[in-house]
Amino acid sequence: MARKRGGFGLLAYAVLYLAFLYVPVLFLPLFSFNNSTFIAFPLSGFTTQWYGQMFADEAVQQALFNSLRVGAAAALAATALALPAAKALTRYRVPGGAAVLGLTNLSLFIPEIVLGISLLILLSALGIPLSLWTVTLGHIVVCAPFAITVLMSRMEGFDKNLEEASLDLGENGWMTFWRVTFPLALPGVISSLLLSFMVSFDDFLIAYFLVGNDATLPIYIWGQLRFPYKLPSVLALGAMILVTSAILVVVAEWVRSHGLKDRHTMVGA
Amino acid sequence: MAQDGLAGRLVHAYRRSEAARGLLLLSPTLAIMLTALAAPMVLLALYSFWTQDGYALNTQPTLAQYATSLGRPTYRALFYRSIEISAVVTFITVLLAYPMAYFVAFRVEKTKFVWLILLTIPFWTSYLLRVFAWKLILGYNGVINSGLMSLGLIRQPLEFLLYNPTAVVVTLAHAWAPFAILPIYVSLEKIDRSLLDAAADLGDGPVRRFLRVTLPLSLPGVIGAAVLIFVPTTGDYVTPTLVGGSGGVMIANVIEEQFDKVGNWPLGAALAMASMAAVGIVTFLFVAAMRAAAARIR
């Protein structure tokens, strides 16, 4: 790896950089096993009591359940919107296609607080009460650019002649979609679902403005940060979230790149 | 499949027309984005010209909210501070990320995938918890203070660590790091390696070659990363609230107040519109300056 000149210095820098990325976050799991309500050195002993306390807390379970529901709904909706959109943008010359893509990607360049308050204004003007559904709507807006980007790159990655061959052989548009396009796009669909789910699951600020009485997990955690005695079980919860989402990222990335490498064998199958 | 009559002809026309098929496939996305993104933004803009009269809304157009937003010294100070903090964060984050991206693009050969995954994991793991981790680290009884005290290096906790603009900068630079690495990496990866060989063959040393070939060609990635960090961080609410203290309050905190405690939505809308305009102008000037600089290097 460090064959070229200056390689060792860069490698050392890269390792330090990774440490800068990871070490601050690793204090959460470290102190979640510490037998003290104070988040401070020296460590006083190993315990799993904070995990027990966290798992026993019904509010945590409810918030987790809410976040899973919102995340699943937002991921499904964003992917269902993005799949035909990605097909249109990669396969057809659509007038105004670039403008639609630009509008979708706009949410990446608007601060989340602005997305949150502007949707809040619209919902209140329409008299729609805040609920987990309104949070889901907000999340669809922020997930859509990720879903479209992933699916477009996947659709650009396989041969469009396969779809044309299917049409030429007499399959109609729907059957071609289900039997050719969808299976080929599947790795993209899975990683779009996973990435959208994680964007939704992680979001605090949009939910903060759009949530009704049912808290999502980040909203619940935010509420607990005020109580020092609750901190250790929040750390336990945080450690669980970090580990789970790290695993999901690796799976999502693996599915995406594995799918890309295997596209020839998949077509042959 | 026999089709006749108007419906049949429409179906036929639809099958033949790429544009119609494409638009039909795009229409669900377009509908959602118009309803949940474009319409709310238009309404936000309208609100910023209205007035809150107690519980009622006065829809007589006025510039009063903008006069307050830009005229009140506390708000003006917050605009400056938000932009200053975000600019510093952007500069530090991009500067730190560049060598990392360079390393993965030019030095790593077989394990690129592993490095990229390692660098993207923090991007997807809880933002709230990444910010909160710094509150634990920098706090009065936090990780650094208690660590240094138990090592006997200090007697009293250091009070300057938490609740100030520097704490906000450090936390944001950490939380947004992955956003800088990926765009820079992509633009470095795209550089045609034969250009570097050509520069070396023509007698450029490594430093000159970097400054004249690699750096200018990677500037699109640097600009992209800078915009991707600068724009959202100016509107960050979590970080200033958790680690900023009174000295690290940013514009998002007063916007939030208008929508929560104060209940003056028109003023909140005007503050949001003004901050987006300010950020837009600064971003435009920055991108223009970078492009001009890139043109001069060449």
Image (cartoon, helix red, strand yellow):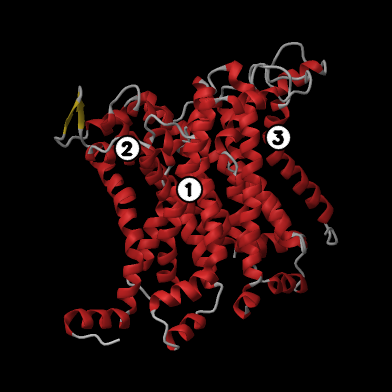
Disc 3 to disc 2, C-alpha distance: 35 Å
**Residue furthest to the left:** B60
Judge by depth and name the residue closer to the eye, A172 or A122: A172
The amino acid beneath tag 1 is Ala
Where residue B187 sits: x, y (%)? 60, 62
Q: Earlier in the sequence, mark 3 or mark 2?
A: 3
Give the numbered dot on residue A120.
2
Q: Residue at x 72, y 44 (%)?
A: A17
Where residue A111 sits: x, y (%)? 43, 42
Say which quadrant the N terminus of chain B sits in: bottom left
Give the numbered dot on residue A26.
3
Which residue corresponds to mark 1?
A72
Judge by depth and name the residue closer to the eye, A9 or B121: B121
Q: Mark 1 and 3 residues: CB-CB less than 8 Å, in contact?
A: no
**Residue furthest to the top:** B155
Tell me if I can see residue A109 in this picture: no
Mark 1 belongs to chain: A
Q: Earlier in the sequence, mark 1 or mark 2?
A: 1
Do the residues indicated by labels 1 and 3 lie within the same chain of the protein? yes
In the picture shown, does residue B67 fall above or below B228?
A: above
Q: Tag 2's secondary structure?
A: helix
Judge by depth and name the residue closer to the eye, A20 or A6: A20
Q: Earlier in the sequence, mark 1 or mark 3?
A: 3
